[in-house]
Amino acid sequence: AQTVTQSQPEMSVQEAETVTLSCTYDTSESDYYLFWYKQPPSRQMILVIRQEAYKQQNATENRFSVNFQKAAKSFSLKISDSQLGDAAMYFCATGANSKLTFGKGITLSVRP
Amino acid sequence: ETGVTQTPRHLVMGMTNKKSLKCEQHLGHNAMYWYKQSAKKPLELMFVYSLEERVENNSVPSRFSPECPNSSHLFLHLHTLQPEDSALYLCASSQYPGQGGYGYTFGSGTRLTVV
């Protein structure tokens, strides 16, 4: 069984600043993956970043990076140099054998 | 056309109506999924199809009936819905099994309102 917890329903960040979105998870799988998805007003879920649980090195994609703490089952997303286009809902998810389990999501607003 | 396409984008239906949601993917994936997204709740997995066979049904009420005629198309047939079924219905596709590390590709969803 897998569960994902995103305890912050909303966050706000000033444009050009850095923000961190929190996520904790639980899984009984030994081989699994972690994801952050972005859902803008267009509603399409877009993959932001993925992390293989067996890799210790934190994943990075341009302005997006994660802080993966496997022992603590924590997987936070850091957005650097925030842009207006980053405003969206962000979902944390864990997956194994192609089955993804999502958190409730967090709404991120970006102040100009 | 590439990606995952869902139609219609919006749907309003009465509780006695019958309607269908359509999903189409052109990514060569062999698995397709229906998710329900309600406000302030995690996405709920409804159905999983792999190679056109249903492999998972997460205790979804029978008023939701999926159909997967081939690996590129997925339908969700709706009948005698309840107002609490109003939600965003998302379709996704992926390679299955074993490549869960690549995640899903999602469509833009159908916003369903039951009146």
Image (cartoon, helix red, strand yellow):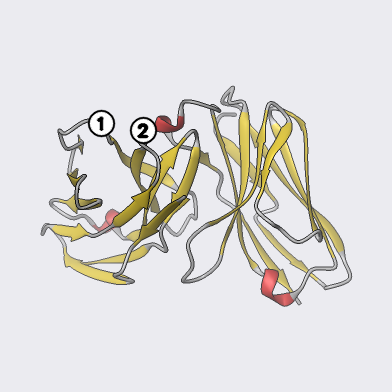
Which residue is at a point 61% across and 31% down the rendered structure image?
Answer: B31
Asked whether the viewer can see residue A34, the reply is: yes
Which residue is at a point 35% across and 37% down the rendered structure image?
Answer: A33
Mark 1 or mark 2: whose residue is earlier in sequence? 2
The Cα atoms of the two marked residues, 1 and 2, are separated by 7 Å
* B107 relative to A52, above or below: below
Asked whether the viewer can see residue A112, the reply is: no
Query: Circle 1 is placed at which residue position?
Result: A54
Query: Which mark is on residue B98?
Result: none
Query: Circle 2 is placed at which residue position?
Result: A31
Q: How many marks?
A: 2
Which residue is at the far left?
A17
Q: Secondary structure at mark 1?
A: loop
Q: Callout 1: few (<14), some (14-19), or many (20+) C-alpha neighbours within 10 Å?
A: few
Whether residue B54 sits left or right of residue A111 in the image: it is right
Whether residue A3 sits left or right of residue B105 in the image: it is left
* A16 relative to B26, above or below: below
For disc 2, the chain is A
Q: Position of residue B43 (x, y in %)?
A: 51, 58
Occupied quadrant, residue B59: bottom right
Q: Position of residue A44 (x, y in %)?
A: 49, 49
For disc 1, the chain is A
| A83, A2: nearer the viewer | A2
Q: Amino acid at mark 2?
A: Asp
Occupied quadrant, residue A54: top left
Which residue is at the far top?
B28
Q: Amino acid at mark 1?
A: Tyr
Q: Are marks 1 and 2 in contact (CB under 8 Å)?
A: yes
Whether residue B33 sits left or right of residue A90 in the image: it is right
Q: Position of residue A99 (x, y in %)?
A: 51, 40
Which residue is at a point 66% across and 70% down the rendered structure image?
Answer: B86
Occupied quadrant, residue A12: bottom left
